[in-house]
Image: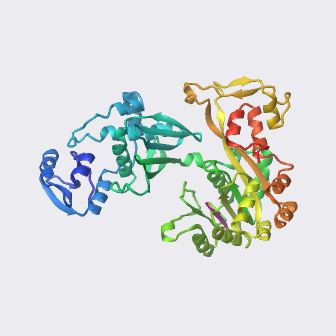
Amino acid sequence: MMNLTPQKDISYAYAKDKGLVVLEDSAEFVSIGVRQGANPVSLIEARRVLGKPLRLQSLTTQSFERALTEHYARESVSGDEAEAALDEHGGLAGLVEGIPQTADLLDGEDDAPVIRLINGLIYEAVNRKASDVHIEPHEDNLSVRYRIDGVLQEVLTPSRRLAAPLTSRIKVMARLDIAEKRIPQDGRISLSIGGRSIDVRVSTLPSRYGERVTMRLLDTRNALLGLDELGMDEVTLERFRKVLAQPNGITLVTGPTGSGKTTTLYSALSVLNNGERNVMTLEDPIEYGLDGISQTQMHHKVGLTFAATLRAILRHDPDVVMVGEIRDLETAKVAFEFASTGRPVLSTVHTNSAAGAIQRLRDMGIEPYVLAATLKAVIAQRLVRRLYEHCRKPHEPTDDELAMFGLTREQAPQLWRPVGCMACGNSGYVGRQGVYELITIDSQLRDLIRADASEDAIQEQALSNFGTLFRNAARFVVTGETSVEEVLRVCRREDEH
């Protein structure tokens, strides 16, 4: 089937509504796919709009939906066009106002305002360094929010009437089933904006007032950082390099969703990928492509789980394996078995602290003696927002703030608070900074793990000579890189166990 975009085309809205789609456009005729049950009268109007004789082809509903998606899908957003549209209409709100209340379904430009709005939303999100775009219908309006530096910010609240055309258009761009609204769907859009390749992961979910859409924006340039660019202090960085230099064992990175675990793993892999090793990864999903590394995408529907795939790749003679996440006992057992054969494994778990990862693995069912023999390090991390230096303001620390971080007034004569201005989007913050705590398994910790010691006992022993997440965040508070409020937002106070 040829899928050529004609000079004249019927609008997406009309094509979907009437069950017609252009399959081929030649100099003499236009081949039209007709959905079963479509009203033949609509062909008369389509003939008038296209201005050429029609050749008809009957399509099943499923074939029609596939042809419709293929014909109207757009794989690139022009940064120049999106920027020009935003300037012309005075921003995103202007693009919303430019969408007519009612529109002629036969108007070939009918979809243009909706397409401009979607392009503008994605372009503006990339421009503002948002990681996600949330589009959620409510009873009276549509909420559009960006997640910037880990915090959601509302950017638009247009009328709810925009929900259907906006969602439908995004689903077409992501090549999802536009007729299916009852189940969640996942797709992707590949974009090129200003010479940058942006991968957009699209997820839809049925909700009370219609489908909500979440778009995750993945920019490869933001993920591929060197170890020295992660923001670790010199002591932690040197300790982490020594861990990666060890020939075997498991290294775990832990933290909540969106704390930068994948970036840390990729940075570690870039150190291990020296061209002499066979480095293989199992990911769900593959977030960024890495040169010289074999990456495998999980597919749970066909049985391609972490555990099953990990067993399979062990027959491909890997030197280093990265498992996206240890979620269950089966995956954990295979990972620990592989690491016990004398090769390094990197993975993540979702826990609040480094010591909590050890407890989580014990709760899963990993025997303490296996854990003690194979685990070599756990690094916990958070991302705190950086204060915008041009609008932050100093303040004298309170006694409680000093006690909280174990500081004296001489060490911290002043701290800083966010203010907010036009340049930082009135948030007071621009960008984020990693905060880390690293546990390396020495002989004393091995004895504690074998003895099935409590999480608190392991934490106390492991971090007796090194700072916790909270204490390591204190240096950024003292230097004015972040605020007390921000550290409290993402890190648990040491007196709260």
Relative to 158, residue 319 above or below: below
Relative to 385, residue 453 above or below: below
Return the x and y of residue 38 as percentages of the image width and height.
Answer: 18, 56
Picture mark count: 0
How does the figure colour the protein chain or chains? rainbow
- Residue 82 in the figure: left or right of residue 230: left
Return the x and y of residue 172 as percentages of the image width and height.
Answer: 35, 51
Residue at 48% of width from left, 70% of height from top? 302
Q: Is residue 322 found inside the magenta-colored segment of the image?
A: yes
Residue at 47% of width from left, 47% of height from top? 215
In which quarter of the view is residue 419 placed? Answer: top right
Q: Which quadrant holds the N terminus?
A: bottom left
Relative to 206, residue 453 above or below: below
**Residue with the most extreme bottom position:** 315
Return the x and y of residue 358 as percentages of the image width and height.
Answer: 75, 60
In which quarter of the view is residue 337 placed? Answer: bottom right
Q: Is residue 479 found inside the magenta-colored segment of the image?
A: no
Q: Which residues are magenta?
A: 318-324
The reply to whether residue 482 is visible in this rendering is no
Residue at 80% of width from left, 36% of height from top? 404
Return the x and y of residue 334 as percentages of the image width and height.
Answer: 66, 71
Q: Which residue is at the front of the view, 260 or 80?
A: 260
- Residue 43 in the figure: left or right of residue 256: left
- Residue 423 in the figure: left or right of residue 24: right
Residue at 80% of width from left, 37% of height from top? 405
The reply to whether residue 277 is visible in this rendering is yes
